[in-house]
Image (cartoon, helix red, strand yellow):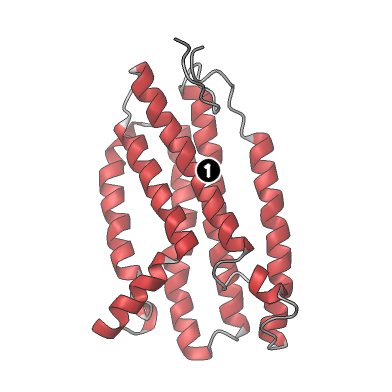
């Protein structure tokens, strides 16, 4: 049986993922209200389970999960390109590896560990109060320089989709994270301004990944003839 036989459609998957994101956001809103307005940190476990600013909870698992889906789709395109000898494959491997790294970072909070390493060794303040953004900003620049030539060869419709996804994710993950560092220093994590900024930051990151998933599935459908998301082994 030839691999890649199942047609790829993003609609049902994206609707499901958006629905889960909406439910998590509503639960986060209640958790933020309890944590910020009423200074409640637990409430039968509700706050730590749903508050976006906590680690290792349901929103964290969701964010890591959608990054894994995006990474898997990118790597599937890479495998199909290699199998079919159709077009460039290496950029998709790089993209899949990057998304996989971000999934691990989200799940294991690697950037926080980098903060623990850099903070005693660097004097930072203001927008750089959380110094992990410095090496990650360099990684963004390096990835952009490596991926840009391939990006410019894409059909324009996919340039728009992936540029929008990258803008949402990077602005949320680094841009608003830097703003949050300033707000946290000035007003603390219990302030309404910090809670609002942190919420917008997380939603931008989620939106960026969901747009990426949509773009990857659309790319599979339109640019990878005969491709399917379900990969089967070739019969002998």
Vertical placement of residue 66 versus 236, above or below: below
* Residue at which label 1 appears: 69
Name the quadrant containing residue 110.
bottom left
Is disc 1 surrounded by few (<14), some (14 to 19) or many (20+) residues within 10 Å?
some
- Give me the residue at 54% from left, 31% from top: 218
Name the residue at the top extreme. Answer: 236
Name the quadrant containing residue 28.
bottom right
Name the quadrant containing residue 89.
top left
Name the residue at the front extreme. Answer: 236
SS at mark 1? helix
Q: Is residue 162 visible?
A: yes
Foreground residue, 6 or 152?
6
* In-image side of 108 versus 123 (left or right): right
Vertical placement of residue 216 versus 107, above or below: above
* In-image side of 131 versus 216 (left or right): left
Q: Is residue 155 visible?
A: no
* In-image side of 36 versus 159 (left or right): right
Q: Looking at the picture, how far across and down is residue 51, in whole percent?
A: 64, 72
- Give me the residue at 55% from left, 27% from top: 230
Foreground residue, 156 or 42?
42
Foreground residue, 149 or 134?
134
* In-image side of 95 versus 135 (left or right): right
Q: Looking at the picture, how far across and down is residue 120, in whole percent?
A: 28, 85
Q: Looking at the picture, how far across and down is residue 41, in whole percent?
A: 66, 83
Vertical placement of residue 7 versus 196, above or below: above
Total tally of numbered discs in the picture: 1
- Give me the residue at 63% from left, 82% from top: 192
Q: Looking at the picture, how far across and down is residue 101, in whole percent?
A: 39, 53
Q: Quadrant of the C terminus?
A: top left
């Amino acid at each position: 049986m030839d691999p890649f036989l199942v047609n790829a459609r993003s609609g049902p998957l994206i609707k499901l993922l958006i629905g889960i994101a909406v439910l998590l956001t509503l639960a986060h809103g209640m958790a933020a209200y309890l944590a910020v307005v009423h200074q409640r940190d637990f409430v039968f476990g509700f706050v730590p389970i749903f508050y976006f600013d906590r680690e290792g909870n349901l929103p964290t698992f969701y964010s890591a999960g959608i990054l894994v889906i995006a990474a898997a789709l990118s790597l599937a395109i890479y495998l199909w390109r290699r199998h079919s000898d159709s077009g460039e494959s290496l950029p998709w491997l790089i993209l899949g590896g990057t998304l996989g790294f971000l999934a691990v970072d989200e799940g294991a909070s690697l950037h926080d560990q980098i903060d623990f390493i850099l903070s005693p060794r660097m004097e930072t303040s203001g927008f750089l109060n959380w110094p992990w953004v410095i090496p990650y900003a360099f990684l963004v620049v390096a990835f952009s320089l490596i991926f840009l030539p391939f990006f410019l060869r894409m059909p324009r419709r996919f340039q728009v989709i992936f540029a929008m996804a990258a803008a949402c994710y990077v602005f949320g993950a680094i841009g608003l994270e830097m703003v949050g560092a300033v707000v946290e220093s000035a007003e603390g994590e219990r302030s309404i301004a910090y809670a609002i900024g942190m919420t917008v930051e997380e939603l931008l990151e989620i939106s960026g990944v969901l747009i990426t998933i949509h773009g990857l599935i659309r790319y599979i459908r339109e640019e990878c003839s005969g491709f399917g998301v379900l990969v089967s082994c070739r019969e002998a």
